[in-house]
Amino acid sequence: MRAVFIFVVILLLIGMAVPITFAVRFWMDGQSVLARAEQSGALRVPARGPLTGVERTIAMSEFRSTWRTSGTPCRTLMFIWADLTTESAPRGMPVSQRVSTMLLGDQEGTSVRWQVRRLIVACQLEQRFDDPQLLRLWLAKAYFGRNETGIETASQSIFGKPSRELNAEESARLAVLLKGPGVRANPERWAERARQMQQRIAAPAH
């Protein structure tokens, strides 16, 4: 009987050790991803401070339900848990996951392993930066169409001025391109989508 008890205890310890081992491995892998990004210059400490008009427009358009101005470590995992256990989980993808996707690349976006890596990296990003900082990291590399990468490049190319000088309508037009860069080929449709975005942003959050 004692041998059976010892055997059961060993099985339980192994059962506990395996998930812990995998968790540590993924956590260390996430740290390696961030370290490589820092060395290559893909991950730099973003500026703090109030959002510009276009940054605020994009934040409310893309991340309104998950937006946090103060650090909450591993809130990505909290969102997932809330999504599984409640009916009132935030909708959409936090900005930390967008930055994580940018750092990892999307070549393996459908694999379970890649998804876990993205969540781990997002969790580690949330420990370092708040959402305004993460937004600036993402916008520095975001694609706006016609081979224009980065918010400053897009702003100068389309409107001929820095992004901080864009008015409300111009900010909405630029924000629309993040969801569908091709709309730029149809000026009327582009203007209409920008108008609708301004209305959604102005509406009270639910």
Image (tube, rainbow, N blue to C red):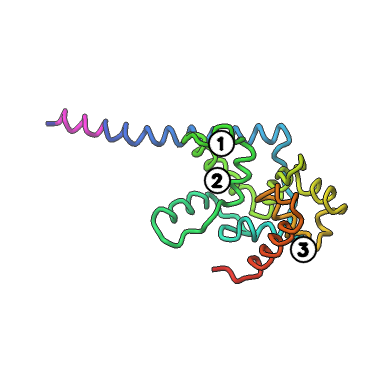
Q: Residue at x 53, y 41 (%)?
A: 120
Q: Residue at x 60, y 60 (%)?
A: 64
Residue 112 horizontal side relative to residue 93, left or right: left
Is 9 magenta? The answer is yes
Please state the horizontal and vertical placement of residue 4, each as a whole percent of the image.
16, 30
Q: Which residue is drawn at 60% across and 42% down?
A: 100
Which residue in the protein does label 1 denote? 30
Is 190 magenta? The answer is no
Quadrant in which residue 68 is drawn: bottom right
Task: Decide if residue 83 is in sight here.
Answer: yes
User: 126 or 180, which lies in front?
Assistant: 180
Please state the horizontal and vertical placement of residue 18, each as a whole percent of the image.
37, 32
Which residue in the protein does label 3 denote? 169
Considering every residue shown, the one lying at the far left of the view is: 1
Q: What element carries label 1?
A: helix
Mark closer to the observer (3, 1):
3
Q: Is mark 2 on a helix, strand or loop?
A: helix
The segment highlighted magenta reads 2-10
Q: Residue at x 68, y 55 (%)?
A: 132
**Spatial separation of the CA atoms under disc 3 and disc 2:** 34 Å
Quick check: 27 above or below 189?
above
Which residue in the protein does label 2 denote? 123
Label whose residue precedes the other's in the sequence (3 or 2): 2
Please state the horizontal and vertical placement of residue 83, each as a whole percent of the image.
44, 54
